[in-house]
Image (cartoon, grey):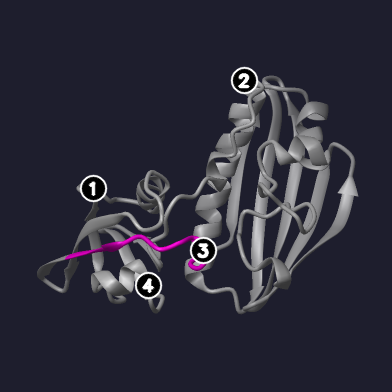
Amino acid sequence: MSNYERTFVLAVSNERAWECFTNPEERAAWLARPDNETGDHFTTAGGDDDGYTLVVNEVVPRERLRWTEMFTRPEGRIEFCAVFEDVDSGCRITITQSRFGGIRDTHWEASHRGWDEAISDLAFYLRTGIPVRRHFFWGGATGFMPHETLAGVEVAEVLPDSYAAAAGLQPGDLVLDLAGAPIFRMSDLWALTRAHKPGDRLPIRYVRGTEMRHGEAPLSDPADFPQ
């Protein structure tokens, strides 16, 4: 899977945009993980706090910020670069990320979708002044790692003793709907699990090969099955 790159323009000054990335209080409004007792996080990649380390590699004020997130389970790292440029309409930011080591495709794809949502939270915060961190709001969890295909969301990995396992899902299944809501993208899954709490029983329809299947089970706890 290719590296992540996203370019967007914020209708604020370069200095204000830079502050949102480098000032811990401002960063906590849109990017840092809530209820964080282990130190400030830049990441939206999730992962295990005990196996997570962040290193800032380069700081060129109001021009470039580079950092590396290192993980031990699985062992690997993600290298980030954020470039800030003045434009007539405000500040143009380009964020790129590259992975190294054992970070799986499914977690890599989830990280990309997470960054898309976090960027929306940043734009919302700068437009309204209200910190929301919608990306970091979790209810229940499905307990499977998906990836997006042209046909929709495909199950890539099912975690033992999870909602997905109890509902009968297997790798290769295509998810049609969850709790009656159509599923086209990973964000659709996240919307549904955010709207329900662990233990809520949700029906799911999915297709295996050419066969329509149905399942139902209680949602898992995201503390046990991170999205």
Task: Give the distance between the C-alpha atoms of the residues marked 3 and 2, in whole angstroms.
Answer: 30 Å
Residue ID for mark 3? 226
The nearer-to-camera label among 3 and 2 is 3
Q: Position of residue 118 (x, y in %)?
A: 59, 43
What residue did someone put label 4 on?
156
Query: At 45% from the left edge and 50% from the top edge, which residue is drawn?
Result: 139
Is 223 inside the magenta-drawn segment? Answer: yes
SS state under label 1: strand
Question: In the image, what residue type sits under mark 1?
Answer: Pro
Distance between the Cα atoms at labels 4 and 2? 38 Å
Q: Quadrant of residue 158?
A: bottom left
Residue tagged 2:
128
Image vertical order of residue 122 relative to residue 160, above or below: above
First reached walking from the N terminus: tag 4 or tag 2: 2
Instruction: Tell which tag, 1 or 3, sits nearer the viewer.
Output: 3
- The Cα atoms of the two marked residues, 4 and 3, are separated by 15 Å
